[in-house]
Amino acid sequence: MHHSIYTPANLTTFTNLDGLGLTAIGQRLTPKKAEILCQVTNPDPWCQTCGTPGNPRDTVTRRLAHEPFGWRPTVLVIKHRRYRCNHCQRVWREDLSQAVAPRQKISRTGLRWALAGLVTQHLSVSRIAEGLGVTWNTANEAVLAEGQRLLIDDPTRFNGVKVLGVDEHVWRHTKSGDKYVTVIVDLTPVKAGTGTARLLDMIPGRSKAVFKTWLAERGEAWKNNVEVVAMDGFTGFKSAAAEELPQAVEVLDPFHVVKLGSEALDQARQRVQREQYGRRGRKDDPLYKCRRTLTTGLSLATEKQKQRVEDLFNVAKHEPVQLVWSVYQRMVDAYRQKKPEIGKWAMEQLINEIGTKVPKGLPELKKLGGTLRRRKPDILAYFDHIGSSNGPTEALNGRLEHLRGIALGFTNLTHYIARSLLETGGFRSRLHPES
């Protein structure tokens, strides 16, 4: 008596052929690959010219790379029938447009698998080519073209942008050729707390004209929707945003503001070091030994680090460094206040003081005060728009560095831009809506 509770496996469904208009009629497995013999599910023998039925002429075989199973390359072996019209003598083949794009060697399901692997699993093109059983060039060209068509060229991906981030990025480390690009990031999900930042676009070059041209190409409705533009200290980005997005608030990122303070501190320490010893710092020099401790916030410093700083500043010759260090610590403390209004007040007081009351003999502090005074509205705007930091933009730059490492570098900027958009363009949810 038959007691089976399982139905036999449907090979067509198991190999994801239902949406391709194909039916599996056989299979052959080898240690290196799997071959699925297929035929068109609903053949159409009618002539598209005169409408009369055609007679089968012969059968040709077409092989397509398909989604792998268990990382075993899978090939669709399609028995492709040709017909001849008895009336007009036209010859045609069965339609495979559901299964494969014109002049393509990879099935649509295989392309979808490859694109999902690139976007959601961060696989290299070499790994994808290995899984499909095709050459690197075939996999790269097909996946980038599908990603461009399905994801990058979608005009709706620019919708809903309210907080914009802009920064420069080094896409290759070579002596020849332009190595800089401008990255434009959507920070709206970060500000709203609904997701992560996503790369909107990447443009060759870094200048006011580059960013201004990109903004000018957007529609007026889109530009009017932008409320905040987060950026670093480059004035070209600020000028472009002010001209093209007059209603938006420019925010100077806290990371870059604190970086200005740490650079001033390092420069003061190095100057005092040279004045005292007539050379650069060595490992046993007090100032050089404290170089990392000086840039540590007091709230994060250990008791040992605090004592090291106290001993350093007990020496009268180190007083210039102490003055710049105190400004740096006040700057860090302002950003770490729990209430934004208190942090804003503290930062405003600091900018007013070092903008007008800088002791003589402190060129580093005078330069810092001038910079902070010029960008004062942008610096203070951060406290009114908490969450509009350019930090996520810097994080995306780090992910792009990782991408370049996986690929062992890029020589083609067009390919790099496409790969970067697929890597950090926020397309994961579109390929896997449940995630």
Image (cartoon, rainbow, N blue to C red):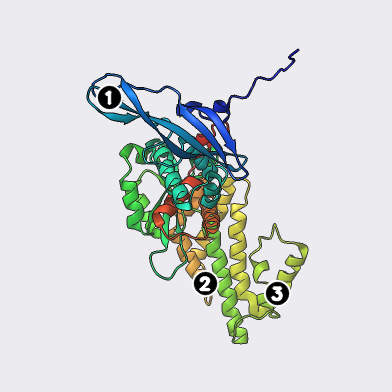
Circles 1 and 2: CB atoms closer than 8 Å: no
Q: Name the kind of residue labelled 3 in the image.
A: Leu
Which of marks 2 and 3 precedes in the sequence?
Answer: 3
Instruction: Give SS at disc 2.
Output: helix
Rendered location of residue 250, percent (x, y): 43, 50
Please identify the quadrant where the C terminus is shown: top right
Compare residues 57 and 22 and report the one nearer the observer. 57
| Residue under label 3 | 312
Circle 2: residue type? Glu
Which mark's residue is nearer the viewer, 1 or 2? 1
Q: Quadrant of the N terminus?
A: top right
Q: Which residue is mark 1?
A: 85
Density class for disc 1 (Cα within 10 Å; few <14, some 14-19, many ≥20) is: many
First of labels 3, 1 by sequence position:
1
Q: Name above or below for residue 172 compared with residue 362.
A: above
Task: Give percent across and percent down for residue 81.
Answer: 39, 29
> Which of the two residues, 112 or 211, is positioned nearer the viewer here?
112
Give whichever of 57, 247 is nearer the camera: 57
Residue 34 falls in which quadrant of the image?
top right
Q: Amino acid at mark 1?
A: Cys
Q: Residues within 10 Å of mark 3 (few under 14, many from 20)?
A: some
Q: Quadrant of residue 105?
A: top left
Q: Which residue is mark 2?
A: 364
Q: Is residue 106 left or right of residue 124?
A: left
Q: Secondary structure at mark 3?
A: helix
- Which image quadrant for residue 102? top left
Please report the residue visible at 42 percent of the width from the left and 61 percent of the height from the top.
180
Q: Is residue 236 visible?
A: yes
